[in-house]
Image (cartoon, rainbow, N blue to C red):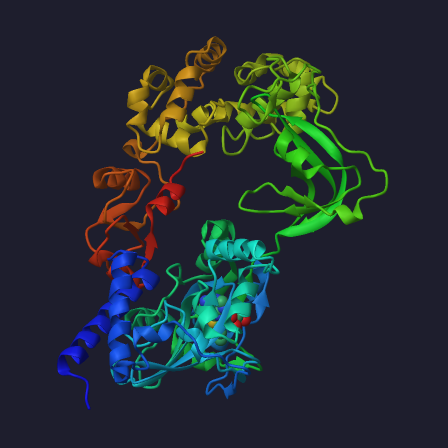
Amino acid sequence: MGVPAVARKEHAKLAADLREHDYRYYVLADPRITDDAYDALFRRLLQLEDTHPELRAHDSPSQRVGGSVTRDFPTVTHATPMLSLANTYSAADVADFDRRVRELLEGRAPRYHCELKLDGVAFTLHYRDGVLAAGATRGDGQSGDDITANLRTIRALPLRIRETVPGVDEFEARGEAYMRKDAFRALNAQREADGEKLFANPRNSTAGTLKMQDSALVAARQIDAAMYTLIAKNSGIGSQKDAMSALARMGFPVNGHSRVCDSLEEVMAYCEEWEWRRDELPYDIDGVVIKVDSFNDQDILGSISRSPRWAIAYKFSARTATTVLRGVTFQVGRTGAVTPVAELEPVLLAGSTIRRATLHNEDFMRDLDLHKGDTVVVEKGGDVIPKVSSVELARRPADSEGIRFTGTCPACDTRLVRPEGVAAWFCENPACPEQIRSRLEHFASRRAMDIDGLGESVVDALVTNGFVRTPADLYALAEHAGAMAALVRFGERKVSKLLAGIERSKKQRFDRVLFAIGIRFVGEGVAKLLAGRFPSFEHVANATVQEMEAVSGIGPVISASVKRFFEDEQALALVAQLLSRGVAGSPVADGGQVPIPFFDGKTFVLTGTLGKYTRDEAKAVIERCGGTVTGSVSSRTDYVLAGAEAGSKLDKARTLGVEVLTEEDFIAALPSD
Ligand code: IVH
């Protein structure tokens, strides 16, 4: 009794469609149908398989829901050992690795393939005739657990590949299973509600999930995967980059942030970029993997014991440390905002010694309920400045004092005010010496006017001795050279060096001057955007709010703040004085183009519909930041910016391994402060 041809045909069509939808949803993150429509197709497939069990093939989409229960996972020996990587923690270690590689390649400079080091659990999959046959954990590298039933439930992994590599009917694909941060948070929230023990981090929850005995429970968890190794005889594939592209074409998920690097400098730039950007990702990474790209070179380099000589892991430094709180001081910023600062026993954190950490504001400080002598956890997160993230209450010294927020300015004793709806307390005394000092320090800082010889202590001496009150006063200092030189610890050489630095700063670009004068919400990036469109003080001061908002990247908050600044008498007096003393700012180069490293020299392709920009606007922004926009995706494309309903260009980007940016990624990369 066979299955009727119509049923067989319908089943085949449904299976193919569901496979395609899984791929679009889980690998490309670009679904084409609603969840309801998907469910309807899926139900129909199950119905057909119930009626005709012969249709329930091993690679049918129905075979992902799990159900098999394994008491003890059988052990399987890996045909090719699953190596691990030597770890390095510094640029010097990476340079050593590069040197060793070059030596073994007899002086030849290798090409490197740099990848994110996903913080998950390694696994391997075995495919025969395009169909998933078995899957296992890494185990000790020689043999692991057969967790095929559990791995089948990971929807991003193809049960049948989309495209075959000519000449390859059997291969292994290896990669990392991981859990996205949002899935992890949701899982823990559910466990908390159910009174179950919480997982410490996404990696632990992934490891725990893959070892569950009931694969139906695994199927209910959202596990993701990304592949980074292809082992296939006679594939003709000669490099890691091509292997990743082949994996993508076969329908495997591969991470889109890999980069080919032709020098140690490029490798380090990649490591630094991701150490800096890691918090932007929706999943955890704990470093970068640097691989020699050419398989031929990999063979020449070989392996020692359990790790290859052709690859290395650059691990990011740990970002939390524990130390003792000595006390809290209060710092007055250039706007008058008063910030509490934790004074700590010095501790090493992410490569530097930390003595102080921010406590943000009164509310943050109160929530921590800090006491003198507390043991605190300091954390270096996405922000540059470390912060105190928690207190170890169990280690609080007996009868230690609680620490309260200050009521008066630590510099001038003025009563602080906290405006309605704002988290900060302000010192509103315009003559507050600390504010004057902070404004001058900002004005002189490296990224603003970059005045040599005008550091913290010199600013302090100049303000304390009444030589300077506003940034414009700096440009009249030459008249007081004699008096300044008479100051203890100043001396003539120091004075002439300082005056030369001040004189030189008159030639700074206009965007730097605009940033230096300290307009609220005008950081470096916004200053560049403004200066690109309004090339002088006169232009900016006369710009209407509408004209400013016509510049991409400038919204109502910024434009209102700029407007307010140029209506303020003191600010206008400062600008007039700067102008009369020869500080007008030199023109911004390139007819308004302001190169931003992320965009500069890069090639972009736009696809789909963006929410906040028309295509022309996005193009203009990219070009102003130094990038180029082209019409089609090729291996020379650096980024594809994909909006809603992106089509074949997005597919092509995935296939070629070109980095895909969402509109949020794009906006995040834009200069704004
Ligand atoms: S390659 C011989 N690439 O890091 C090279 N590993 O100690 C084998 N990992 O066990 C690994 N992301 O769990 C490689 N892009 C990546 C990776 C990666 C994460 C993990 C993997 C491996 C460990 C290396």
Quadrant in the rendering for residue 24: bottom left
Relative to residue 614, is residue 374 drawn left or right? right
Question: Which residue is outermost to the right?
Answer: 398
- From the top left corner, tell me how far across and down residue 515 is, in percent: 46, 27
Question: Which residue is outermost to the left?
Answer: 6
Quadrant in the rendering for residue 345: top right
Q: Identify the residue at image location x=54%, y=53%.
A: 189
- For the N terminus, the image quarter is bottom left
- From the top left corner, tell me how far across and down residue 101 is, in percent: 50, 72
Number of marks present in the image shown? 0
Q: Would residue 320 be seen by someone viewing this image from the given angle?
A: yes
- Establish if 377 lies above or below 594: below
Q: Identify the residue at image location x=31%, y=35%.
A: 593
Q: Would residue 635 be seen by someone viewing this image from the given angle?
A: no
Quadrant in the rendering for residue 66: bottom left
Relative to residue 167, is residue 585 drawn left or right? right
Q: Identify the residue at image location x=75%, y=46%.
A: 393
- Establish if 48 lies above or below 336: below
- For the C terminus, the image quarter is top left
| Depth check, front residue: 557 or 166 | 557
Relative to residue 324, is residue 108 drawn left or right? left
- From the top left corner, tell me how far across and down residue 177 is, in percent: 46, 68
Q: Identify the residue at image location x=42%, y=67%.
A: 225
- From the top left corner, tell me how far across and down residue 464 is, in percent: 69, 17
| Depth check, front residue: 673 or 636 | 673
Relative to residue 71, is residue 155 drawn left or right? left
| Depth check, front residue: 235 or 35 | 35
